Image: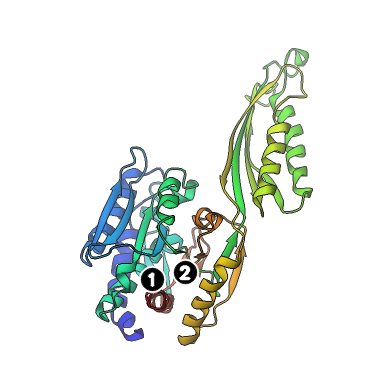
Amino acid sequence: MQGYFEKEKENMLHLLERIVNIDSGSYQKTGVDKVGNILIKEFAQLGFIADVHEVPDKGNNIVLKHEEATNPSILLIGHIDTVFPAGTVAKRPFKVEGDHAKGPGVFDMKASHVMTLYALKCLISQNNDAYKNVYIIINTDEEIGSIVSRELIEATAKKVEHVFIMEPADLDGNVVTGRKGGGKFFLKIYGKSAHSGVAPEKGASAIQELALKIVQLHELTKWKGIHVNVGLVSGGQSVNTIAPFAEAGIDLRFETQEQGEFAQAKILEICSFTETPNTRMEISGGITRPAWKTDESQHELLLLMKDAASELNIDLGTTYSGGGSDGNFTGNMGVPTIDGLGPRGGNAHQDDEFMVISSLSERGQLLVKVLEKLNK
């Protein structure tokens, strides 16, 4: 098996270069669909049929199933959208430096799609029909909360017994067995402009009101398992004008669903009234990803993965993440879910993002071994 991945190394890197060198930010439909179409054609050569779910303003979501499959019991999920703006590829295209591949989205998570494809190719080369036991979802809006693809993910997850999220692994190769839930809220405050020197009493400062709210929102972090961060603020008209408008983006993280619902209620309560006279506010948003806590249903799947890793002389660790993924949805549903099966690397969402090339083989072999064991 190791020999197979070593033999295919250059082909894997060539495909990875093709899809990394396409700008595919979440709102760049043309680029996202271009990446999706390349992958559809690659999987079609293996006999996988694509069910394309059209999305008018974002990339089309894709479900793949082998033409000879009947009722697959495993779901593999991965996204092809990135966080990078149009033009990023022109500034820093795909490149190889030693054992590192670099480029926008190379680690999070385009390398995972290449690895998944070649893991299935490996199974086919071994005449092992485990490749018929999988659904694959390629979704296109994970970086913005999987708002459109969530329904498709949850509907497909109901059909299977196990879910693997092909998000990348950290440098240690740990798999993820739980994630915090999260929410996004957007606050707009309207005041009244006035000259700050001539007639400040005629104005009502939206920035003043926002400052009061920020303090109260951040105080919610004192509650166990809850973290609130006002990460974006803007407002005002000029330095010598009482601010007629201000807005903020609020991030919420929580460990249990109960904590999330409590925190959401508190955020909405805080933002339900103003304390600065002649101001008003609007609040939108809510919980976008439920909390996913490890439970007994997941334990058996994790043991199987550890056995597979042991056979490959891999010491497989686990981690709990504060970041969200599509695993929040399937894990919260109670479907046994393991996350972080992709290649190793680091610095996701940054200019120096990288993927460890040798881990394409290491993690690809692990996926092959796990699929083999679950197909017995």
Residue beneath the point at 36% across and 64% down? 113
Task: Please state, as top left, top right, bottom left or bottom right, where the N terminus lies in the image.
Answer: bottom left
Q: How many marks?
A: 2
The amino acid at mark 1 is Val
User: Quick one: label 1 or label 2, which is nearer the N terminus?
Assistant: 1
Residue beneath the point at 32% across and 73% down? 130
**What residue does disc 2 label?**
341
| Image-quadrant location for residue 98 | bottom left
Residue beneath the point at 41% across and 61% down? 160
- Where is residue 20 drawn, in percent x and y? 35, 59
| Image-quadrant location for residue 42 | bottom left
**What residue does disc 1 label?**
96
Task: Please state, as top left, top right, bottom left or bottom right, where the C terminus lies in the image.
Answer: bottom left
| 224 or 132: nearer the viewer | 132
Q: Secondary structure at mark 2?
A: loop
The amino acid at mark 2 is Leu
Report how far apart the C-alphas of labels 1 and 2 lie in the structure: 22 Å
**Vertical arrangement, residue 216 with respect to residue 194, above or below:** below
Residue 103 visible: no
Viewer-nearest of labels 1 and 2?
Answer: 2
- Where is residue 185 drawn, in percent x and y? 61, 38
